[in-house]
Image: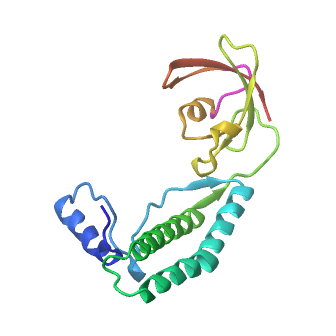
Amino acid sequence: MWLPFTLLPWLVRFQQEKYPAEPALESPCDGGEIAMSEKQVFLTREGLRKLEEELRYLEEEKRRQVASRIQAAKEEGDITENAEYDDAKHEQAFVEGRIMTLRNMIRNAVLIEEEGPSEVVRLGSRVTVLEEGATHPEVYTIVGSAEADPANGRISNESPLGRALIGQPVNATVTYTAPIGTIRIKILDIQ
């Protein structure tokens, strides 16, 4: 269901009044923005740079493009049944939401320092593991959830495997639960 952006403050108040113990959104903060979680976001320097680039692109270019689309759709006449206008407004809401998310992530960023070899797995570690019953080892880099990309060997410290590996030394065997069941792996190397 699509709601006009102007209804957002009302929706926040309604949810807080109806569900005071479990608010869906936090209270509005100064400037009319919705307060977001203050959860730490663990990022590598490269990950932080990518988020800053995306934010810059959205604020400096994408906003202008969307505003132009909205203006062009308004010039077509009646906006009540104008699909292009509705689509542009939806895109605007998405872009503004992503900008808020990126600002929050950057504000709460904690850099993962690459300190070289370690005795135990930590954020930023490159870990070589062998799954029980497998013949070929796999290599994973432990990153924060914002940079996780399992298909490319970058697993989140918050994932079941990431949580199982953090703090473990070389030659430790750890167990974690995955959708296919319980999996045991041995840590072969930590870099």
Q: Quadrant of the C terminus?
A: top right
Observer-nearest of 122 and 57: 57
- Say if the magenta span includes residue 12: no
Residue 156 on image: x %, y %? 60, 41
Place residue 172 in its image quadrant.
top right
- Horizontal arrangement in the rendering, residue 40 relative to residue 138 (left or right): left
Q: Quadrant of the N terminus?
A: bottom left
Observer-nearest of 3 and 178: 3
Residue 56 on image: x %, y %? 65, 74
- Horizontal arrangement in the rendering, residue 4 relative to residue 153 (left or right): left
Residue farthest along the right direction in this orientation: 116
- Tell me the residue at 53%/32% (across/down): 160
Residue 89 on image: x %, y %? 42, 74
- Tell me the residue at 28%/68% (across/down): 12
Question: Which span of residues is magenta-colored?
Answer: 166-172
Observer-nearest of 104 and 62: 62
- Tell me the residue at 62%/70% (across/down): 55
